[in-house]
Image: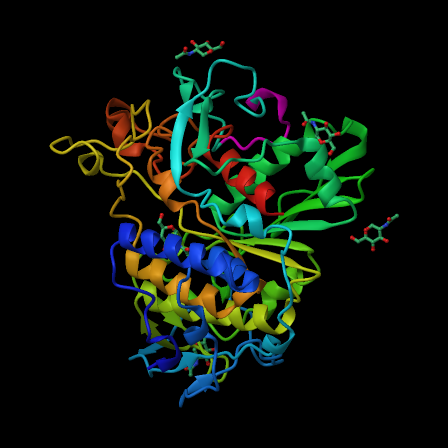
Amino acid sequence: MSQRWSRKKSRLPLAGLLFMLALAVTFMVLYNERSIQQIHLHHNTNREQDLPQTSTFTSFVHPNLPPRNNLEVLDRYSRCNSTNEYSGKKIGWVDQMSGQRSDFVAAAAKEEICDVFSGKWVFDNSSSSYPLHKESDCPYMSDQLACQKHGRPDLEYQHWRWQPHPPCNFKRWNVTEMWEMLRGKRLMFVGDSLNRGQWISMVCLLQSVIPRDKQSMSPNAHLTIFRAEDYNATVEFLWAPLLVESNSDDPVNHRLDERIIRPDSVLKHASKWQHADILIFNTYLWWRQGPVKIQWSSEEKGSCEEVNGAEGMEMAMNAWAHWISNNVDPNTKRVFFVTMSPTHQWSREWNPGSEGNCYGEKKPIEDETYWGSGSDIPTMRMVERVLRGLGPKVSVINITQLSEYRKDGHPSVYRKFWEPLNDDRLKNPASYSDCIHWCVPGVPDVWNQLLFQFL
Ligand SMILES: *[C@@H]1O[C@H](CO)[C@@H](O)[C@H](O)[C@H]1NC(C)=O
Ligand SMILES: *[C@@H]1O[C@H](CO)[C@@H](O)[C@H](O)[C@H]1NC(C)=O
Ligand SMILES: *[C@@H]1O[C@H](CO)[C@@H](O)[C@H](O)[C@H]1NC(C)=O
Ligand SMILES: *[C@@H]1O[C@H](CO)[C@@H](O)[C@H](O)[C@H]1NC(C)=O
Ligand SMILES: *[C@@H]1O[C@H](CO)[C@@H](O)[C@H](O)[C@H]1NC(C)=O
């Protein structure tokens, strides 16, 4: 299946890939500026071959079907009354606007010759520059991310600065400049709780310069909106952890054993995100929790098929890509995809022989080749293929490697937990440590600086 994507980018190890990338860049700088932009947006040395061609799918479903009246919206009460084997149906898409590819981000091309995602963390206690904002100054902080408030004794985690390898540099965060870029615009984050963390970091970074009576936050809902009156701008978060319609679309009440998705329906969420000017998407961890049930819109109510998480994610990414390819003009709308956020659940991965997790970690990992087992490489390749097919319509914010180093950046026990903790657990802090989300201020601030860099 999916012949279009069967030519994998490369089986070379990363170092070889980067070397080839460097060579290719040196070579192409002389010839073709447009190719350079594309290479750097997608880290791709082989783009021409992978442009979408006429579809060869046989069982091919177009997402975005208009909602049918008899089709119930999936919610936490949805069930499968029968589950069949996967029929092999795929989500396919062809880039409808490929003829209109423009000289997108010409101005940014120079910066993107650098790989700002590759570098190291530098402890920065010398100036008052880090952290970029104070936890207690932000009225919108989440109790799940406010590590200092919840008693974290070591605060060094707030003082690490990301330093891309020379000659690359990192544009200094400038809140006024960021607001000027957002003037009259809607910036929207769409995804899961990791993306929500990045949104909270962004709101906290931005709100400090807006007088309290000129800013507002709508109540926490499916779509939560921060408004800055004088800039006529919003910074929004849309809960859509699986991107496509699912039974987990309630932002609060979504703890389910059975995940059901409708991979041919992104419309439910897309209707909320379609008017945003700048979109930041993510999805990953929700696909890592076992099999996923599918309800195709064309099937009888309650009849499901089952796939594994990676297959489910690929379908969702393709449905999303279909929407992007048909609805995004890169001259008027900017779209970013944030790669997988790493977890630090097993300390043996960076400290062989140990049996803990991120609990008690106070320093980043220094081994630049470190890559944890939670960041699935086949999934990364799949994401790359999908993004590459979208050309200049999507830019990647590749947070994975740089966040891999930050075993010290998670809340561990220093956050509010939803369930009360019994004595057994309290005696063993590692057992309930959160090694998935990130303290704010902290790592997500750097993800936002990367975004600032590319806007
Ligand atoms: C960094 O600076 C803060 C505040 O100035 C101080 O409390 C902290 O001990 C310093 N940390 C290190 C490792 O020097
Ligand atoms: C931040 O950006 C504004 C507007 O572009 C500029 O006037 C100001 O000098 C910048 N501040 C710093 C510290 O670079
Ligand atoms: C505010 O921004 C919206 C777009 O987000 C635009 O339609 C509207 O005209 C703007 N209003 C003002 C007063 O500039
Ligand atoms: C599946 O279950 C729902 C209620 O749970 C029912 O309304 C529906 O008719 C069932 N569909 C089939 C095909 O049995
Ligand atoms: C992100 O960066 C890693 C290396 O740090 C690379 O292996 C991966 O392919 C990149 N992902 C994307 C989508 O560009």
Identify the main secondary structure in magenta. Answer: loop
Colour convention of the picture: rainbow
> With 91 as the anchor, is 362 left or right in this view?
left
Taking the spot 48% from the left edge, 78% from the top edge, the residue there is: 52
Q: Nearer the viewer, residue 365 or 414?
A: 365
Q: Which residues are magenta?
A: 135-143
Quarter occupied by residue 307? bottom left
Q: Nearer the viewer, residue 13 or 412?
A: 13
Taking the spot 43% from the left edge, 43% from the top edge, the residue there is: 117
Quarter of the image with the N terminus in it: bottom left
Residue 82 position, x and y percent, is: 34, 78
Q: In the image, is residue 74 above or below residue 140?
A: below
Q: Is residue 112 visible?
A: yes
Residue 362 position, x and y percent, is: 33, 22
Residue reaching furthest bottom?
Answer: 58
Does 434 lie within the magenta span? no
Quarter occupied by residue 206? top right
Residue reaching furthest front?
Answer: 30
> With 75 as the anchor, is 414 left or right in this view?
left
Q: Is residue 242 visible?
A: no
Taking the spot 58% from the left edge, 35% from the top edge, the residue there is: 171
Residue 13 position, x and y percent, is: 25, 55
> With 431 as the anchor, is 321 left or right in this view?
right
Q: In the image, is residue 112 above or below residue 333?
A: above
Q: In the image, is residue 414 above or below residue 299?
A: above
Does 141 lie within the magenta span? yes
Q: Nearer the viewer, residue 41 or 309?
A: 41
Residue reaching furthest left?
Answer: 353
Q: In the image, is residue 332 above or below residue 403?
A: below
